[in-house]
Image (spheres, grey):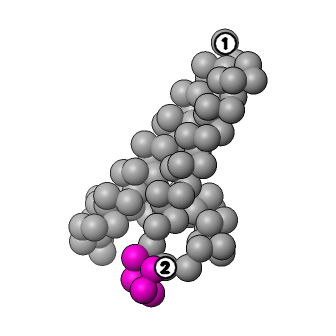
Amino acid sequence: MLTSLILSLINAYSIVIFVYVLMSWIPHDSGVVGDVYRILGMICDPFLDLFKRLIPPIGGVLDITPIIALVVLQLIERLIVIIL
């Protein structure tokens, strides 16, 4: 029961990060899209900032930290499945 709840939360957070990254590709200065983007930023940025401190953008432009963050979440998920 608890395991499935934790795994569901990890999956939901992975989806939130993915949507946040996709939204970064579209204009989001104002309006509903901007509000949603800011809310997702408040949810995702603390976790992504952990990796941004360790991994600088490639060429100063390409930020791969969301990919690394998603991989880490998947590894945590698999570890939980193995342990529990």
User: Looking at the image, is mark 1 or mark 2 nearer the viewer?
Assistant: 2
Q: Quadrant of residue 15?
A: top left
Relative to residue 43, is residue 3 drawn left or right?
Answer: right
In the displayed structure, 19 sits above or below 75; it is below
Please tell me which residue is depicted at 51% across the width and 50% down the height of the picture: 70
> Which of these two is toward me, 25 or 39?
25
Query: Which label sits on residue 1?
Result: 1
For the residue marked with disc 2, what is the amino acid? Pro
> The C terminus is located in which quarter?
top right
**Residue 6 part of the magenta segment:** no
For marks 1 and 2, the one nearer the N-term is: 1
Q: Position of residue 35 (x, y in %)?
A: 38, 61
Residue 37 higher or lower than 28, as above or below: above
Main SS of the magenta part reads loop
The secondary element bearing badge 2 is classed as: loop
Q: Position of residue 33 (x, y in %)?
A: 29, 60
| Total tally of numbered discs in the picture | 2
Q: Tell me if residue 5 comes above or below residue 79 in the rendering.
A: above
Is 35 positioned to the left or the right of 69 in the image?
left
Residue 8 position within the rendered picture, expressed as x and y whole percent measured from the top left = 54, 27
Residue sitting nearer the eye, 83 or 36: 83
Residue 57 has which mark?
A: 2
Q: What residue is at 60 percent from the left and 49 percent from the top?
A: 72
Q: Give the residue type at disc 1.
A: Met
Q: Which mark is residue 39?
A: none
* Residue appearing at x 38%, y 60% in the figure: 21
* Span of residues in magenta: 58-62
Which x, y percent locates residue 10?
57, 36
**Residue 10 shown left or right of residue 34 in the figure:** right
